Image (cartoon, rainbow, N blue to C red):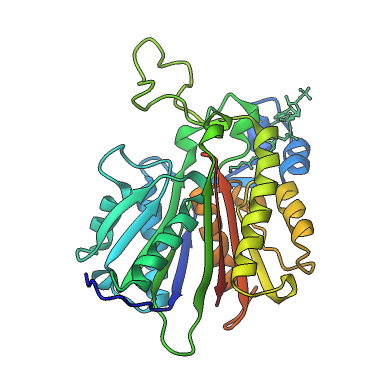
């Protein structure tokens, strides 16, 4: 680490993603809870989601996504200096999932820790790492959004179990070389007055799981969907506008908006409010549902690899989640 006052530009040098093999379709779910493909698709835009295999943990998915990002960035695991895993479904409460990932990758020269900012975690990690690399504190960083939400869903509650899925996405950040892309602007926010709208109430120190409450689903996701929806639209719109303005861009300069993948109606509402030209918003939630911190990271990787934008294009990432938390980033690719 160096204490010198520097201000390096920071770029995304590689991305990667991984989703488990097992597909759980809306029709499959309709066999176990009172729901239908029609309800789920029209209300959310989701057709199916992926479910981790027995013995497949958040760290395993994170490492698989990370290896692809490292390969694209042309870096060996041993060259990575910092690993941040954004997750609300860690392998264990402690140590951090990032420590397991460090071991699995053999990234033994990296400092590794987790952050818990729900669906916003990947962009929180991006902002933190951009600053740390810009300051010269770290040469590069591996940021990962990874979730095994299937382990924290109440499979008897149709209002939540149809929404979530498992997966991981990763990105390697490093100092940019002349002519390379750059993370232009970042924004993040939190409203702790609204913790009750979306949470996992049990399993922490406030409400440990005991023999008395073990069957009550306290350690599963609980959400007041309608309320969350309203805040999601407003906060994501504001955060996206903030980074577009700070990056000195106009809506028409954005080649691709990559939003959190929770609900197609939320995505459509944001696209409309931002006045981004049609067809420039990336959506993959039909295949994966809401994978929380992993969602925007998987979407970024899939969008980049599918040619949704090219080198030199401006893109905007924007997310929202429990906390409530929100974040955005404007990036020149
Ligand atoms: O990732 C973090 C951020 N999360 C989000 O952004 C999620 C935001 N919220 C949402 O996406 C939506 O609020 C949901 C998709 C969760 C729910 O959609 P909604 O249009 O707000 O529906 P609702 O909760 O008001 O439920 C409407 C009806 C209810 O029945 P009644 O009371 O009108 O008779 C529900 O019981 O739909 C019923 N319902 C279902 N029916 C069939 C709820 N879940 C289901 C289901 N299948 N799976």
Above-or-below relation of 216 to 242: above
- Report the side of 55 relative to 220 (left or right): left
Image quarter of residue 137: bottom left
The image quadrant where one finds the N terminus is bottom left
Q: Position of residue 265 (x, y in %)?
A: 75, 47
The answer to whether residue 47 of the structure is visible from this angle is no
Above-or-below relation of 95 to 212: below
- Report the side of 327 relative to 273 (left or right): left
Comparing 22 with 124, the one in front is 124
Q: Position of residue 49 (x, y in %)?
A: 59, 46
Q: Position of residue 274 (x, y in %)?
A: 74, 61
Number of numbered discs on residues: 0
Taking the spot 30% from the left edge, 52% from the top edge, the residue there is: 113
Which quarter is ligand 1 in? top right
The answer to whether residue 249 of the structure is visible from this angle is yes
Above-or-below relation of 181 to 190: below
Q: Position of residue 2 (x, y in %)?
A: 22, 72
Comparing 326 with 104, the one in front is 326
- Report the side of 167 relative to 2 (left or right): right
Above-or-below relation of 287 to 51: below
Taking the spot 43% from the left edge, 78% from the top edge, the residue there is: 9
Image quarter of residue 304: bottom right
């Amino acid at each position: 680490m160096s204490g010198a006052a520097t201000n390096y530009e920071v770029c995304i040098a590689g991305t990667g993603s991984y989703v488990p093999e097992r597909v759980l379709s809306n029709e499959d779910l309709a066999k176990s809870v009172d729901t239908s493909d029609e309800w789920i698709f029209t209300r959310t835009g989701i057709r199916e989601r992926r479910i981790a295999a027995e013995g497949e943990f958040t760290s395993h998915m994170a490492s698989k996504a990370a290896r692809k990002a490292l390969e694209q960035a042309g870096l060996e695991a041993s060259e990575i200096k910092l690993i941040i895993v954004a997750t609300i479904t860690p392998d264990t409460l402690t140590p951090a999932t990032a420590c397991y990932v460090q071991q699995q990758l053999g990234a033994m020269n990296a400092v590794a820790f987790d952050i818990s900012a729900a669906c916003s975690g990947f962009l929180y990690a991006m902002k933190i790492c951009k600053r740390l690399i810009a300051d010269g504190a770290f040469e590069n960083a591996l940021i990962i959004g990874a979730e095994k939400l299937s382990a924290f869903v109440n499979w008897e509650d149709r209002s939540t179990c149809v929404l979530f899925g498992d997966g991981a996405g990763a990105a390697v950040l490093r100092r940019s070389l002349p002519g390379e892309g750059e993370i232009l602007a970042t924004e993040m926010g939190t409203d702790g007055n609204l913790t009750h709208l979306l949470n996992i109430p049990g399993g922490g120190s406030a409400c440990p799981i005991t023999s008395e409450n073990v069957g009550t689903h306290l350690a599963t996701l609980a959400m007041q969907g309608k309320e969350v929806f309203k805040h999601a639209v407003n906060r994501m719109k504001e955060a996206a506008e903030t980074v577009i303005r700070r990056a000195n861009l106009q809506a028409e300069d954005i080649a691709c908006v990559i939003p959190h993948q929770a609900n197609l109606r939320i995505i459509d509402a944001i696209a409309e409010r931002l006045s981004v030209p049609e067809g420039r918003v990336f959506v993959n939630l039909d295949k994966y549902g809401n994978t929380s911190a992993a969602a925007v990271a998987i979407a970024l990787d899939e969008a980049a690899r599918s040619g949704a934008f090219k080198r030199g294009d401006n893109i905007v990432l924007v997310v929202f989640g429990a906390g409530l938390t929100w974040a955005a980033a404007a990036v020149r690719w």
